[in-house]
Amino acid sequence: MPETIHNPVLPGFFPDPSIVRVGGDYYLANSTFEWFPGVPIHHSRDLVNWRLIGHALTRPAQLDLRGVGDSAGVWAPSLSHHDGAFHLVYTTVRTRVGPFKDVCIFLTTAPAIDGPWSDPVSLAGGGFDPSLFHDSDGRKWLVNIEWDHRKGKPRFAGIVVQEYDPRERRLVGPVTRVFRKQELIEGPNLYKVNGWYYLMLAEGGTGWNHGISMARSRSVTGPYEPDPQPLVLTSRKNPSLALQKAGHGELVQTPAGEWYLAHLASRPLYPERRSMLGRETCIQKVRWSDDGWLRLEDGSTDAKVDVPAPRQFEPHPWPAEPVREEFDAAALSPHWSSLRVPIDESWASLRDRPGWLRLRGRESQHSLFDQSLLARRLRSFVTTVQTCLEFDPQHFTQSAGLLCWYDARTHYYLRVTHDEALGKCIGIVLTDDGAYDELTASQISILDWPRCHLRAQIEHERLQFSASADGRLWQPIGPTLDASKLSDDYGQGLHFTGAMVGICCQDLRGAGAAADFDYFEMNEWA
């Protein structure tokens, strides 16, 4: 009988965790950035075993991502439950390059965790990382960071709060800046414990210098005094820890009164220190000190891989997820995501050819608008992904196949296409930090293949593509590639997502050439 929480509890690209308990049920929500649907919801009854039950943002009315850049979109949602309803506040970021942040904070509510989630209320701009605090006196407060674009000013201008009126569904009263530091702070959350208002903060940026700090006040609008211990949780000074970049968290209390902290962390591959699984969700056990400050249970500031489960632990495992999806159900698994747009029958159909998934080709893999691309999170450093497709391209502008993806600037693509000399052929194209390339030396003709089985084998930093006409006899396609590049830590600029694996189809002439996929299989080992 397991009595340990093993981290990460959500392996793979599940950053910025927000946790809430309702009765005996725990729920986790995470950022999704440019991926649709937005904000996955995981469910647990023991803090150890988690399952994906769906997403909060499933309609264009809730989420418009067309044209947003890589790592823009949905940032840092915060989930809460009060007055018999679930509340989710989130930011949609449209501009993230340069001095400006064009953002809007939204609020959606639902009577149950599986919805229906309402059309969103627009609350504010000017900042991000919002959370909604439900005070014991019935008042509600929005807390978020304020962004300052001005020359010579700190970009992170401090933490602000403003009252939210649920009857009028709008913010009311003054905006009050309640806290700022020399150190970069974001991700604010408010809690009320033993008469104190506690402000939990993500500090130091979401990279190697990340951490969680605290401040407290007797009033929700401050002034807030900083914790005399600079950080509650961090890995910035201990590169030997398995969980790096630890920070950005939320608190939850068990029915028995124990406290836990959900936070993000990354597991880098060495020696490059690249975290291709992205920022993952972890849980630590915490306590309140005699002088009223939050501390990790063991008194350190180190994120642990193994953490004691609640004392009144009753295991509640979920059925194992199937490794293979045959595309014979009425709907796709909730583990699938698309880039920026909803998955719909116009380009991803389970009905056009029963037992197959038909993708109709649209724009290129560099598009920020209408890609026909479906992907799932890479959750293990040792994974084999396999699919089979039937596709008859007639022109070099038509292609379909298997993708290993970080974003539009960095990905690997094993594709079937058409070449004037080879006819129907298979080969690799890639984009490496914005530089497009075609590995033409490894391209082979497959004119006599009625079907094409494609495979990607990932073993830590090594990625090997291969193909087969029958699914039994495989041949390598191209050289061993560097999978670790599918990472926050590779390339220019700031990145916030994680590696994905999936399938896609393009038709740059706009004729909607169709590729039919028979199955998709993911085997994970470590």
Image (cartoon, helix red, strand yellow):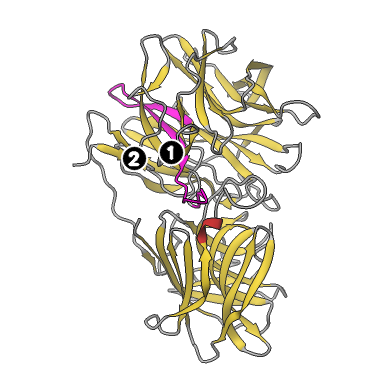
Percent across and percent down for residue 72 are 65, 45
Q: Quadrant of residue 298?
A: top left
Q: Residue at x 60, y 12 (%)?
A: 221
Q: Magenta region: which residues?
A: 249-276
Seen as rendered, the residue at the extreme right is 151
Q: Residue 513, relative to residue 255: is it above or below? A: below
Give the numbered dot on residue 44: 2
SS at mark 2 in the image? strand
Q: Residues within 10 Å of mark 2 (few under 14, many from 20)?
A: many
Percent across and percent down for residue 357 are 49, 71
Q: Label 2 amino acid? A: Ser
Q: Label 1 amino acid? A: Leu
Q: Quadrant of residue 100?
A: top right
Q: Residue 180, relative to residue 304: is it above or below? A: above
**Viewer-proximal residue among 416 and 152:** 152
Q: Residue 217, relative to residue 95: is it above or below? A: above
Tell me how far mark 1 sits from mark 2, CA to CA: 8 Å
Q: Residues within 10 Å of mark 1 (few under 14, many from 20)?
A: many
Seen as rendered, the residue at the extreme front is 271
Q: Residue at x 42, y 53 (%)?
A: 379
Question: Per the image, is 256 magenta?
Answer: yes
Q: Which residue is mark 1?
A: 28
**Viewer-proximal residue among 126 and 379:** 379
Q: Quadrant of the C terminus?
A: bottom left
Percent across and percent down for residue 129 are 59, 32
122 sits to left or right of 526: right
